[in-house]
Image: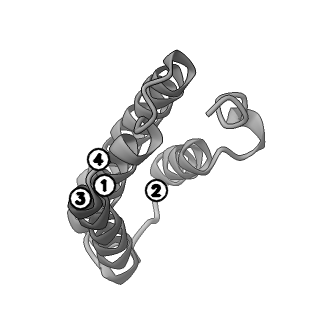
């Protein structure tokens, strides 16, 4: 992999993490998570081995499903509270969906079967 490309992906990974941590709005948190996903995918698949490509596809599908759940959770919360603020997570359905999405993104126990293969 080109060193400039590797540097760009590493800087994008740090930028996405910074945006996610410092966000107070659901859409900016989602954008930071998506920047992280798009930056890590080329780094996972840099060796063109079939197992690396399989791991990249599994990682992408799980992260896309978790991002969809996160957006759906924030829309339910915004519908019921009228705010997109992260600190106003009051609806129980949106709290459950957000917890599920974060557990999927982190590979926590009920959603951890994809993590060892990647």
- Asked whether 89 or 28 is in front, the reply is 28
Q: Which of the two discs, 2 and 4, sits closer to the camera?
A: 4
Q: Earlier in the sequence, mark 2 or mark 3?
A: 3
Q: CA distance from mark 1 to mark 3?
A: 22 Å
- In this image, 1 relative to 105: left or right? left
Residue with the mark numbered 3: 31
Residue at image point 33% right, 41% down: 72
Indicate the secondary structure of the residue bearing disc 1.
helix
- In this image, 29 relative to 89: left or right? left
Q: Earlier in the sequence, mark 3 or mark 4?
A: 3
Vertical side of 72 occupied by 91: above or below? below
Q: Quadrant of the C terminus?
A: top right
Mark 3 neighbour density, 10 Å: few (under 14) some (14–19) many (20 or more): some
Q: Which of the two discs, 2 and 3, sits closer to the camera?
A: 3
Q: What numbered label is drawn on residue 91?
A: 2
Q: What numbered label is drawn on residue 38?
A: 4
Q: Earlier in the sequence, mark 1 or mark 4?
A: 4
Q: CA distance from mark 2 to mark 4?
A: 30 Å
Mark 4 neighbour density, 10 Å: few (under 14) some (14–19) many (20 or more): some
Asked if labels 3 and 2 touch by Cβ distance under 8 angstroms, the answer is: no
Q: Which of the two discs, 1 and 4, sits closer to the camera?
A: 4
Color theme of the render: one colour
Asked if labels 2 and 1 touch by Cβ distance under 8 angstroms, the answer is: yes
Vertical side of 94 occupied by 22: above or below? below
Vertical side of 85 occupied by 67: above or below? above
Residue with the mark numbered 1: 80
Q: Earlier in the sequence, mark 1 or mark 3?
A: 3
């Amino acid at each position: 992999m080109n060193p400039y490309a590797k540097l760009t992906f590493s800087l994008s990974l740090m930028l996405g993490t910074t945006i996610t941590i410092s966000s107070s709005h659901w859409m900016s948190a989602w954008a930071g998570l998506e920047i992280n996903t798009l930056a890590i995918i080329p780094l996972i698949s840099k060796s063109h081995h079939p197992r690396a490509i399989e791991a990249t596809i599994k990682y992408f599908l799980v992260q896309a499903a978790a991002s969809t759940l996160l957006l759906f959770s924030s829309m339910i919360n915004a519908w019921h509270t009228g705010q997109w603020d992260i600190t106003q997570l009051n609806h129980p359905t949106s709290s459950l969906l957000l917890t599920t999405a974060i557990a999927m993104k982190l590979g926590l126990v009920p959603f951890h079967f994809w993590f060892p293969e990647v």
